[in-house]
Structure formats: structure tokens, C-alpha cells
Amino acid sequence: MLIKYFIIGLGSTVIYFTLSLISLNHLNLSILLSTSIAFICAFIFSYTLQSFFVFKSKFNLKNLRRYLSIQLLIFIISYSTSTLIFTKQEFTVLSIAGLMALISFFIHKKWTFR
């Protein structure tokens, strides 16, 4: 279960990191807008695959709301912390992704998909 979670999480992180950097460096969007767009795309990918392949859960609004609330909370905390610590945007993007992955598995396992 944990291995599948991290493989899907890695895919989600690649999507997040790639879209964030493209938005920052090529579209010249702000760090907040870039990471928000990337978050939405990675969220859709991650929720869909994690629901079906990791937690063996059917799609339902209760789990979607729980998953979204946890991911948003972790995103806000990670974004706030990372922008205070790092001055280079690439490190901020990477640290947000890393923090979200570490924290979210256990919360989703214990609360979202219980």
C-alpha cells in the first residue's frame, strides 16, 4: 500500500513540479498562481489513482471533500513555511511537494479512506 502510494505520489510530484516551473519560468506567473495551478492538476491525478489503486475506494463526495481539505491544509502550511525559509523559487516548489507527500499518506490512511 505504501509503495503504491509513493509511486503515485512521485507521479503527482513530477506533475506538480513540472507545471510549477513551466508556469514560473516560461509563463512568468507568480509563485502562488503557479503552485496553485500545479496543485489542482496534481490533485486530480493523485486523488483518482490513490482512491482506486491504493485505498481501493470508490469515488464518493465524502472522501473527495476529506481528501481536498487535507491536501489544501497541507498545501497552505507547506507554502507558508517554504516561502519563509527559501528565497529561491525552485527550492520552495520542491519543499512544498516533499512536505505534502510525507504528511498526507498517514492522514489519508487514518481519516480520508477509513
Image: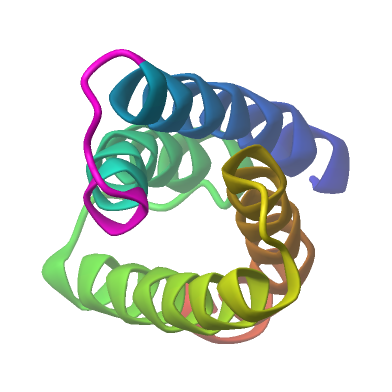
Instruction: Name the spot of residue 76 as percent of width and height, x first.
Output: 43, 79
From the viewer's side, name the closer residue of 86 and 72: 86
Q: Is residue 41 above or below residue 27?
A: below
From the viewer's side, name the closer residue of 90 and 62: 90
Reply yes or no: does residue 78 show up in magenta: no
Q: Which residues are magenta?
A: 26-33
Instruction: Name the spot of residue 99 as percent of width and height, x first.
Output: 73, 65
Quarter of the figure that contains the N terminus: top right
Instruction: Name the spot of residue 7 as percent of width and height, x first.
Output: 74, 27
Instruction: Name the spot of residue 86 as percent of width and height, x first.
Output: 72, 63
Image position of 10 (left or right of 31):
right
Q: Is residue 57 above or below residue 109?
A: above
Q: Is residue 98 above or below residue 60?
A: above
Give me the residue at 42% from left, 53% from top.
Answer: 57
Image position of 56 (left or right of 106):
left
Reply yes or no: does residue 30 show up in magenta: yes
Q: Residue furthest left?
A: 61
Question: Which quadrant of the figure has residue 4?
Answer: top right
From the viewer's side, name the closer residue of 14 and 62: 14
Give me the residue at 54% from left, 79% from top.
Answer: 114
Give me the residue at 60% from left, 34% from top.
Answer: 13
What secondary structure predominates along the stretch shown in magenta? Answer: loop
Give me the residue at 49% from left, 19% from top.
Answer: 18
